[in-house]
Amino acid sequence: MARIFSGIQPTGIATLGNYLGALRNWVALQQGDDECVYCLVDLHAITTFQEPAALREQTRQMAALLLACGIDTERSILFHQSAVSAHARLAWIFNCVARMGWLKRMTQFKDKAGKHQEEVSTGLFTYPNLMAADIHAYHATRVPVGDDQLQHIELANDIAEKFNHDFGVAFFPRIEPLVLKESARVMSLRDGTKKMSKSDPSDMSRINMTDTADVIAQKIRKAKTDPEPLPEHVHDLDARPEARNLVGIYAAITGHKVSEVLHRFAGSGFGPFKEALAEALIAHIEPIGNRTREYLKDPTALDRILQEGARKAEAIAEPIVAEAERLVGFLPR
Ligand code: AQP
């Protein structure tokens, strides 16, 4: 049995991108033999400023959504990162193991910081070290991620290797990223070259997992497209990012291959295709949104679920991080 770790930032309402790139896989992975540890990474969330009351609200909202998607706390551990101090302690050690040059190469930092590299928080820069700590604190070896996170997994492996080398031990194992190819990356509905993000300022750029049927239909109707009809061949989508994105979403949500979707819609304009896409999305997402709203009616129960999860997470992470601290040379706590 291996251990799986994955996290999501409570920086807003989860999007269709989070769902197809990550959450859906989290639910499926519970059926296997591996132990699943799923974390609401609130320490990561504050690398960009979060209004405190909103952060509390968003963390509960994300917990409710994960439960609504099918995360089962009998099978998986679900908790919020700040409740288990082992994450921050190991992250500090990794801050001292990782090299500046490694972090400077991280494309997600460059994307997120953009032209403001001097003004963003240092936490945003060292974010990948905390992510490495999240995984290694559990000796997790399998990590389901969207393909945008692959570089961070490579970095987590580099950090583990350097730690093992520096301290002359084989303590942290290698991590294997799990990426589902067909649905790996969902792009913005307004710009097919930009990833769909829960913190994009434009709500029309994304499908939120709690959007109602009307809102989903409207967002798909207004999604950016081009004037050409849908093509016959998959490679004809290469230069058409918006069309490729919508066809990819339809394929992922219906469980078909992109080629099968094109076979059905080739030659048709976007009107009928968008109608079919909206219908498929609504059938899939609306029940999840309804269940999320049900869970949110009892915030105390949600807090309790997360706290119980945190105690289980701590029971695994504490001895591992205590051993890392001993290896580094710290006296016992
Ligand atoms: N558009 C996407 N397509 C596929 N997968 C995605 N993921 C995020 N966006 C897409 C995957 O969702 C998991 C959780 O992501 P996160 O919330 O920890 O951070 P993120 O990748 O930065 O997601 P967002 O939605 O873009 O959040 P903000 O706007 O706060 O930065 C990850 O596995 C990620 O790959």
Image (spheres, helix red, strand yellow):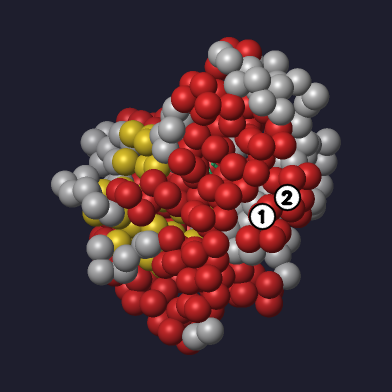
- Relative to residue 328, is residue 107 depicted above or below? above
Residue drawn at x 49%, y 64% as measured from the top left:
287
Left or right: where does residue 123 sit relative to residue 76? right
**Image quarter for residue 308?**
bottom left
Residue toward you, 97 or 303: 303
**Residue 240 in view of the camera:** yes
Task: Give the amino acid at mark 1.
Answer: Ile
Circles 2 and 1 in contact, beta carbons < 8 Å: yes
Residue drawn at x 35%, y 71% as measured from the top left:
309
**Residue 18 in view of the camera:** no
Left or right: where does residue 224 sit relative to residue 143? right
CA gap between label 2 and label 1 equals 5 Å
- Looking at the picture, how far across and down is residue 306, in whole percent? 41, 74
Report the disc number at residue 219. Answer: 2
**Image quarter for residue 255?**
top left
* Residue labelled 2 has its Cβ within 8 Å of some atom of ligand 1: no
- Looking at the picture, how far across and down is residue 5, in whole percent? 36, 50
Report the disc number at residue 216. Answer: 1
Residue drawn at x 73%, y 70% as measured from the top left:
51
Residue toward you, 84 or 16: 16
Left or right: where does residue 81 sit relative to residue 118? left
At label 2, counting other C-alpha atoms closer than 10 Å, the crowd grade (few under 14, some 14-19, many 20 or more) is some
Left or right: where does residue 289 sit relative to residue 205? left
At label 1, counting other C-alpha atoms closer than 10 Å, the crowd grade (few under 14, some 14-19, many 20 or more) is many
